[in-house]
Amino acid sequence: MTPRYAEVALPLPLARPYTYRIPPELDARVLPGVRVVVPMRRRSLTGLVLAVDVAAPDATARDIEEALDAEPAVPAPLLETARWTSAYYGAPLGLAIKTLLPAALWGGSGAGERTERVLVLAPERLTLVERDARFQRRPRQRALYETLEALGGSAPVRHLMEQLGFSDSLVRALARDGAAQIERSERLRDPFAGVTGTPPPPVLTPAQEAALAGIERVPPGGGVLLLGVTGSGKTLVYLEAVRRELARGRGAIVLVPEIGLTPQTVSRFRGAFGDQVAVLHSALSDGERADAWRLLRRGDRRVAVGARSAILAPVANLGLIVIDEEHETTYKNGEAPRYHARDVAGVRARLEGARLLLGSATPSLETMARTGLPTDDPGYLLRLDLPDRIESRPLPQVELVDLRSAPLVGGTGSIAWSLALDGAIGTALFRGEQVILLLNRRGFAAYLQCPDCGSVRHCPDCSISLTVHQTPAGLRCHYCGHEEPVPDRCGECGGPVQRMRGIGTQQLERLVAERFPEARLGRMDLDTTSTKWSHQRILESFERREVDILIGTQMIAKGLDFPNVTLVGVVDADTGLSLPDFRASERCFQLLAQVGGRAGRGPRGGRVLVQTRCPGHHSLVHASRHDTIGFLEQELTLRQSPPAPPVLALVRLVVSGLDEIETGSTAARLAEWCQRLIDRHGLPVTVLGPAPCPVTRIKERWRWHAVLRGPSPDLGRIVRPAARRLAKRGREPAIIIDRDPVSML
């Protein structure tokens, strides 16, 4: 026989696949998308077949050792999506392939699977007379037999023992007797199995019906932007759109930006579609993610709900992809491949003939720009509006409190606490209503400063100040995790007094507890949500009205629906407004508009108080007017000069290393190489930098960056050769390619 060869990608930072020979005994099983075990140097690794019947390599090919799947684990469209991700973002193909499977499934045959013993009655059931004879002196065996019969003929042994009180010896005795047998069965882990949820309202509003009609008009592979104000019922449109796809025999993927939103989203979708829903997100264990993946791949579940990585869920016959709060930066992956789930979703929708539905009250400028493209452009989005809240409830009144002139409450230390916000909280509590307070900075204080010499305690490994925490007490770096005790004296001058500057959610929580001692408080930030299901516990407590005031960072600003919340207070709207990032104003507007939308969702209405020292800033002015279109138009004008996305696209090249001088030199050589490539091809691309990153050092590594600015297709002509060049160099200093970056820090 003529030898056959296959291309196999390994889940490693490798730029290209390897070629292996297909042994005759595996000839029928080695197909594209199948996991195989292959030799790699002196060990065996699990890889994924990309193609078969490829040309023989120049060197002698080694044999594939084992095929792990009876049929492809990864369908062809997902393989093609991974290839696109690798090429577009300049990421190693091996890392792009690695994202297609849960970690547990890269471990070999049966990896991540869990089985359990199941007691199954024999096919020939005993009559009453036969039972009387066989179990005459064994009443417990008869009870076990009849219990199994009542349970449908089988039951997990663990359930019989732990819940029903039968012993293991009794189970084995019934099996020895021939009346039953013990089998091994797959035991799937579903942490959301008990979530039932509530069905959605049976009647949609005319605006929702019109939006659904618009979605239906979009051809397969096309996309829609659903621009709906907060509380307009976008989720109900998602639910109905998914229901229609399920009725056609197709599946759906629904993405949410934060893990904290997942429980509420799962509840809604389980209420509508029952056990058709599988959940995928990073808070699950490897085994739980692997089980959800298997259910989707087999077609036992047809709706995948999750965060960013769920965009690669193996949903069979995919018909719809929904991305809620599409503007959120959490949809951008923070490590290679640095993909944006929104863009990967567009590619996957076109490959599989699915519709793409993006939803937001505050869409990104990049997404809004796509609604103005020619209708025959592959990136075109049809814009559909939901301009009003459900039941025509008014949007909450938003008041900007100018901290430069507003009367303040005394005795609050470094916290600017206005009389207006203080009084509004008291009134809401008196009425039995709930309050949300946003402060987008965790910890107790931003930094510690000596009042004598002015020195600030900095992280020894990062170029940022240490944040003061009180629970537990200490100074902490939010980049690398470095911790140290709060010093008694200044390390520079020996002064005995340390002064805290800036405020965080811990300090705000203490102030609110002092101002409103009868109120029940909850805090939601990275410090309180580090354990599994902590998001769910906090939000469920708030939903049950066991918490009167919820204090938190940006994670409380999105997607949450609590009708009893009548007041939202933004303690410091200026946090992040002046960051060295062209998206700072856009993020500020989105955060204020989103958190303000948590108020007034019930019949009591709502009110939003925004404390600021910049009341004339255009992002705050438009947020106070609920004027999304006005903000987007003004912000787009500001991005014309200097040009920034969506006017032009960006690629950020970040160099990091342990040696400061070598890192800067490497960045300079990289920028020069890019400029030579641009000049050689005559590309309309500008190189900015190199320069130190705004955060110049993280985890002992110095950081420089250069930014390429130009049309996206021309940037691709630099990214691809840059990726090939980087694949051939050593690892120090490290260089990353971040195409379409969401942060410039």
Image: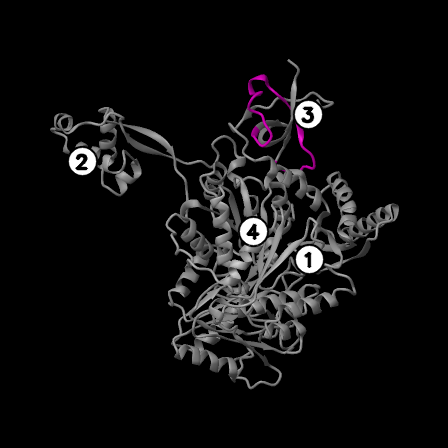
Work out how far the residue at label 2 is from the one at label 3, CA to CA, in angstroms: 62 Å
Magenta highlight: main SS: loop
Query: Which residue position holds label 1?
Result: 697
> Pointer 2 and pointer 1: residues touching (CB < 8 Å)?
no
Q: Is residue 739 magenta?
A: no
Q: Which residues are magenta?
A: 11-36
Query: Which residue position holds label 3?
Result: 54
Q: In terms of secondary structure, where does tag 1 sit?
A: strand
> Pointer 3 and pointer 1: residues touching (CB < 8 Å)?
no
Q: Earlier in the sequence, mark 2 or mark 1?
A: 2
Q: Amino acid at mark 4?
A: Glu
Q: Earlier in the sequence, mark 2 or mark 4?
A: 2
Q: Amino acid at mark 3?
A: Val
Going 41% across and 40% down the picture, which residue do you hit? 188
> Pointer 2 and pointer 3: residues touching (CB < 8 Å)?
no
Residue 279 image point, x, y percent:
47, 48
Q: Amino acid at mark 2?
A: Ala
Query: Which residue position holds label 2?
Result: 143
Q: Quadrant of residue 477?
A: bottom right
Q: In terms of secondary structure, where does tag 4 sit?
A: helix
Q: Is residue 30 magenta?
A: yes
Q: Earlier in the sequence, mark 4 or mark 3?
A: 3
Q: Quadrant of residue 374?
A: bottom right
Looking at the rendered structure, which numbered label has been put on residue 216?
4
Q: Residues within 10 Å of mark 1 (few under 14, many from 20)?
A: many
Work out how far the residue at label 4 is from the one at label 3, CA to CA, in angstroms: 41 Å
Work out how far the residue at label 3 is from the one at label 1, CA to CA, in angstroms: 46 Å
668 to 351, vertically: above or below: below
Work out how far the residue at label 4 is from the one at label 1, CA to CA, in angstroms: 50 Å
Going 49% across and 30% down the picture, which residue do you hit? 109
